[in-house]
Amino acid sequence: MMIHTVLDMAQAVPVPNPEPIAPPGLEKPINTILGWGKWGVIVAGVAGLLICGAQMAIGRKNRSSFAADGASGIPWVLGGLSLAATASGIVGMFLG
């Protein structure tokens, strides 16, 4: 009697892995929506950095906690922009 492990059984059964195909007529609208999202992230990133800079400038005198809040917001803005910039690569790495 032969005992098969789960790994042996998983390797024995071929699983189909088709290429992603956009449904007919949806490729252009989806690209438009993704483009709007990308534009929105760019606007939010620029606004976020401007707000952080304004907080730092305003909080320079006698409002050091306000300036510190602005400075501590910069990594969050840059992190969000970095995630947005690499989003398609990250998704492609997991599903590609």
Image: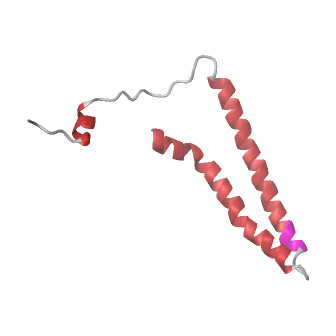
User: From which residue to which does the magenta span run?
Assistant: 54-58
Q: Quadrant of the N terminus?
A: top left
User: Residue 31, percent across and down?
Assistant: 66, 31
* Residue at 79%, 58% in the rendered image: 48
* Residue at 11%, 37% in the rendered image: 2
Q: Quadrant of the C terminus?
A: top left
* Residue at 85%, 73% in the rendered image: 66
Q: Quadrant of residue 7?
A: top left
* Residue at 22%, 39% in the rendered image: 8
Query: Looking at the image, is 24 positioned above or below residue 13?
Result: above
Q: Quadrant of residue 60?
A: bottom right
User: Residue 52, percent across and down?
Assistant: 81, 65
Query: Looking at the image, is 70 positioned above or below residue 61?
Result: above
60 drawn magenta? no
Count of marks placed on residues: 0
User: Residue 58, percent across and down?
Assistant: 90, 73
Query: Looking at the image, is 90 positioned above or below residue 73?
Result: above
Query: Looking at the image, is 91 positioned above or below residue 44?
Result: above
* In this rendering, position of residue 61 left or right of residue 35: right
Residue furthest out toward the top: 24
* In this rendering, position of residue 10 left or right of residue 81: left
What colouring style does the render use? secondary structure
User: Residue 86, percent across and down?
Assistant: 58, 49
Is residue 73 or residue 86 the one in the foreground? 73
57 drawn magenta? yes
